[in-house]
Image (cartoon, helix red, strand yellow):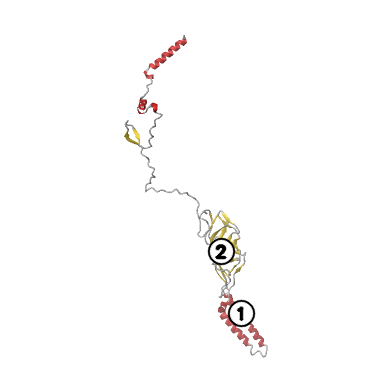
Amino acid sequence: MKSSLNKILTTAFALFISAVPVCSLELDHSVDEEIRKNYTPSALEQQELPPLPEFGDYKDSSTQNNTPILDTKPISTKPTTPPKNIVITPNIPTSNKVNKNLPGSEVGKDDFTTIKIKRWTKIKLKSNSIVSDYLHEGARVKFTTTAPIYQKYVTIPTGTQVSAIVTDSHQPQLTGNGGLVVLKIETISFNGRVYSANGKVTKANQKNIFFNNIKGKRKYWSSVVTQVDKGQKFYEKTRKTSAKLSNNPFGTIISPIPTIVGTVAYALNFVGSPIIAIGYKGDRISIPAGREFEIKLLDDVHLSL
């Protein structure tokens, strides 16, 4: 009885709900009508749809149905030219490396990592061959460092090769002038490569060198003194001869003669010694291999690591 009553009430409630206008649904079939006007539903799958319009601005024109369409004007692909007042900076890759090449150096263009030996740096060396005034201009002399060269971030080791070129030389000359050798530091070898350098010699064979001139001892003034000494010695001999003659009865008369001759000879040597000394030459230069030298750099030297 209760189940039959529930069924009756449920059916009555459903009919009530369907009859109320507020709860009813109204379907808009206007879209379907527009589609049927333009397309045949049965043949829709076989028809080719119109191409999609390209992106662009909407035109203020209308079709037959007064609907806006998209602008199908092709988009220009030409590169745009920027205004002249805008400065364009090219995209150049930056680098923190700096090339420090020197003219005449064998450092390549791609060698960016360099170290610098500052000017006025003094370097101790030993000669690999004889340094003498027999060397002609343009000859080269090799040296080897005997102490490390300490620089920032690196140490140039002992045994580094240094080359010098003879820029002037001559053997002992008249007027008492000695031999001469002038050396100019030309290259420094490091890590198997050769680098240009500019330096001068400040010490040779443990002796100070001035104006980069390795000179033999000048003997002009010493030759003058030597010539005067010769006259004095000759005078002393004549005095002794005169003394011996005076002790002999037969020689007393001629005993003054040797003294007079010695006096004249001494006077001539004393007066003429500056002229006679011109014919004397100075000392030669001959420094054996392995002797100590010291050089000073006149310009910075850049070495590649």
Q: Nearer the viewer, mark 1 or mark 2?
A: 2
**Along the line of sight, which residue is nearer the eye, 99 or 121?**
99
User: In the displayed structure, would residue 163 be above or below residue 98?
Assistant: below
Residue 259 x %, y %: 62, 85
Q: Which mark is residue 164?
A: 2
Image location of residue 21, percent across then percent down:
37, 18
Q: Disc 2 marks which amino acid?
A: Ala
Residue 89 x/y as whole percent: 42, 48
In this rendering, would 86 be left or right of 115? left
* Residue 171, image x, y percentages: 57, 72
Counting every numbered tag in the picture gives 2
Residue toward you, 86 or 49? 49
Question: Which quadrant would residue 177 be assigned to in this image?
Answer: bottom right
The image shows residue 114, relative to residue 233, as above or below, that is above
Residue 257 falls in which quadrant of the image? bottom right
Q: Residue at x 62, y 82 (%)?
A: 234
Q: Residues within 10 Å of mark 1 (few under 14, many from 20)?
A: some
Q: Is residue 77 above or below residue 294?
A: above
Q: CA distance from mark 1 to mark 2?
A: 44 Å
* Residue pictured at 39% horizontal, 28% vertical: 43
Vertical order, 266 against 192 (above or below): below
- In the picture of the structure, the residue carrying the numbered disc 1 is 230
Front residue of 86 and 217: 86
Which amino acid type is shown beneath numbered disc 1?
A: Lys
| Extreme-top residue of the structure | 1
Disc 2 crowd, CA 10 A, few/some/many (<14, 14-19, 20+): many
Q: Secondary structure at mark 1?
A: helix
In the rendered structure, the answer to whether residue 33 lies left or right of residue 300 reads left
Q: Quadrant of the C terminus?
A: bottom right
Q: Residue at x 57, y 62 (%)?
A: 163
Element type at mark 2: strand
Q: Earlier in the sequence, mark 1 or mark 2?
A: 2
